[in-house]
Amino acid sequence: EADALLAAEDSFWSFVVGWFCFLLYLMIGAAIFCAVEKRSFVDMFWMCLVTTCTVGYGDVYPLTTTGKLLNCVFISVSVVLFVSTFSSTFDYIYARQEALVKQHALSNKNMEDMIAKFPLLYDALKKQREKDA
């Protein structure tokens, strides 16, 4: 059980660091595109976000040759970072779920052990279940 909880905690920090790096990458990319394209940070952040998510609405896009070349590099790096970030997110969710399942199984085992210590209680519960079924 302790190993599952440690794995979930490790996955949690990978999840947090992954999302922090992803947002930092978007902000740095937006700042660079602001300088190259001479447009607002909000527009360039929007373009970086939409480009990274591979949606590509086309409402904001680079106009300069430098911006277009930079966008090719940005897309390549951002797809890898995007996949990595979502992978760490699902790893965290899976590790947490597995820890909860193991904790639930241990609780059930403890309950069965407790019932086995009290055979009369066990027999009464068994009769009640048969009666209800």
Image (tube, rainbow, N blue to C red):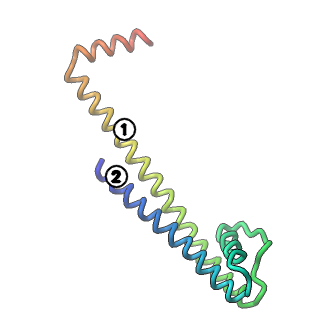
Q: Is residue 15 found left or right of 114 in the rendered image?
A: right
Question: Which is more toward the observer, 68 or 26?
Answer: 26
Question: Which is more toward the observer, 133 or 61?
Answer: 61
Q: Is residue 114 found left or right of 105 in the rendered image?
A: left
Q: Which residue is mark 2?
A: 5
Q: Which residue is mark 1?
A: 104
CB under 8 Å between discs 1 and 2: no
Say whether disc 1 or disc 2 marks the residue closer to the N-terminus.
Answer: 2
User: Above or below — where is 41 with respect to 14?
Assistant: below
| Residue 133 point in image, percent of width and height | 44, 13
Q: Residue at x 76, y 89 (%)?
A: 64
Tell me which amino acid carries mark 2: Leu
Based on the displayed image, in which of its 4 quarters is residue 32 positioned?
A: bottom right
| Residue 28 point in image, percent of width and height | 59, 80
Helix, strand, or loop for circle 2? helix
Tell me which amino acid carries mark 1: His
Q: Label 1, label 2: how many angstroms apart (C-alpha)?
A: 13 Å
How many discs appear? 2
| Residue 12 point in image, percent of width and height | 42, 59
User: Above or below — where is 4 with respect to 112?
Assistant: below
Residue 25 got which mark? none
User: Above or below — where is 111 with respect to 94?
Assistant: above
| Residue 80 point in image, percent of width and height | 56, 72
Helix, strand, or loop for circle 1? helix
Q: Residue at x 22, y 17 (%)?
A: 119
Question: Which is more toward the observer, 38 or 115?
Answer: 38
